[in-house]
Amino acid sequence: MKQKRQGQTLIEVCVATIIAATVTMGVFSVVLSGFASQKKADKREMAGLMLKQAQETLKSYVSADPTNSNFTSGTVPLVTSPGSPGSPIGHWPAEQGNTTWALAGALPPGRIHIITPLLIGTPLADAVTGLPAPSFKYTVTNVNCLRIGSGIYASVPINDSNQCKVVVFELIYLDI
């Protein structure tokens, strides 16, 4: 009869080590991918919220009257917070350097309004050297949906304030 040896053989130790390493790697992989997925999901949710917020803010400028002298920049506003949504001054303060109506448009390809400052302080503002910087803008294109200047509207002058608008948003951020 053969005597039993105490302990494990080298093969048994190697196999046990490989199994333990594989299990550990699998657990860490799941945990790390969970963190990365959560960060991406948070950014996507924030992007959706930013787009919705921008849409809602622009709605307040739809009823602005560009023919009103209080509508243009440089005039005395009728409200205490000039430039705020709903203000007779139709400029959106997020659009720095531009003092035109928030819905000022043009014929195709349209007029670009840059509102990137809205991203400051959000996870969407993360920047990485060598990759495109985050940006947020919208393009307003005028569409003569009422056929102003012809037919029954022949006497109505065509201008930016009486055109239908098509607004397209573009939000670029790092999804990493």
Image (cartoon, grey):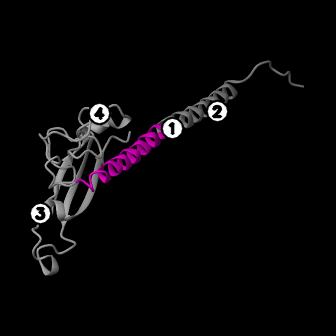
The earlier-in-sequence mark between 3 and 2 is 2
Taking the view exactly as shown, the residue that stands out farthest to the top is: 6
Q: Mark 2 points at which residue?
A: 19
What is the magenta range?
Answer: 37-64
Upstream in the sequence, badge 1 or badge 3? 1
Name the amino acid type tagged 4.
Ala
Residue type (three-letter) at the residue carrying disc 2: Ile
Q: Name the residue under label 4.
A: 127
Which is in the foreground here, disc 4 or disc 2?
Answer: 4
Q: Nearer the viewer, mark 3 or mark 4?
A: 3
Q: Name the residue under label 1.
A: 33
Up/down of 7 relative to 14, above or below: above
Type of the residue with mark 3:
Asn
Place of residue 82 in the rendered image (x, y in percent of width and height, measured from the top left): 23, 38
Q: Is residue 19 left or right of residue 44?
A: right
Q: Which of marks 4 and 2 is nearer the N terminus?
A: 2
